[in-house]
Amino acid sequence: MARKRLIIEMGMGIDQHGQEPTVAASRAVRNAIAHNALPGVWEVAGLSHPNQMIIEVQVAVPYPEQVREEEVLAVLPFGQKTLIVESGGMIVQGRAIPELNDKNDEMLIAIAAVTVFIEDE
């Protein structure tokens, strides 16, 4: 069996307060999948259940070693999911607000690509 790409979706996510790379990464993945429907999974690829999709997520975010993988992948409701996290994204100076539990004035920006594959015979 060969894997074939069905779709690639891109997104961006920001954590303005709290300096949590997992939050920024999760928001980037959510943004990537927020406005799509995949009728091709059923009508073209012939899958019988959405868990048959193979989903690879690639996220670039500041402080990648702090990303909690299971939380990012939990954004995706279906599929056989994997995550690749790498250093990237952006750090922008914001405003630290103690009431929002800011550690500093950094805003973290993440970018994500979500690729859906199918197995083809």
Image: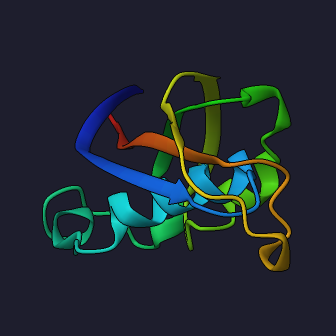
In the rendering, at what x and y percent does residue 52 appear? Answer: 50, 58
Task: Say which quadrant the C terminus sits in.
Answer: top left
Residue nearest the viewer, comparing 93 with 13 = 93
As drawn, is 71 to the left or to the right of 79?
Answer: right
Report which quarter residue 82 is drawn in: top right
Residue under the point 50% across and 44% down: 109
Residue under the point 52% across and 62% down: 27
Residue nearest the viewer, comparing 7 with 44 = 7
Task: Say which quadrant the N terminus sits in.
Answer: top left
Report which quarter residue 111 is drawn in: top left
In this rendering, the answer to whether 59 lies above or below 101 is above
Residue under the point 13% across and 59% down: 44
In the rendering, at what x and y percent does residue 114 appear? Answer: 40, 45
Residue under the point 24% across and 70% down: 42
In the rendering, at what x and y percent does residue 50 appear? Answer: 46, 69
As drawn, is 116 to the left or to the right of 76?
Answer: left
> How are the residues colored?
rainbow
In the rendering, at what x and y percent does residue 115 appear? Answer: 37, 41
As drawn, is 62 to the left or to the right of 34?
Answer: right
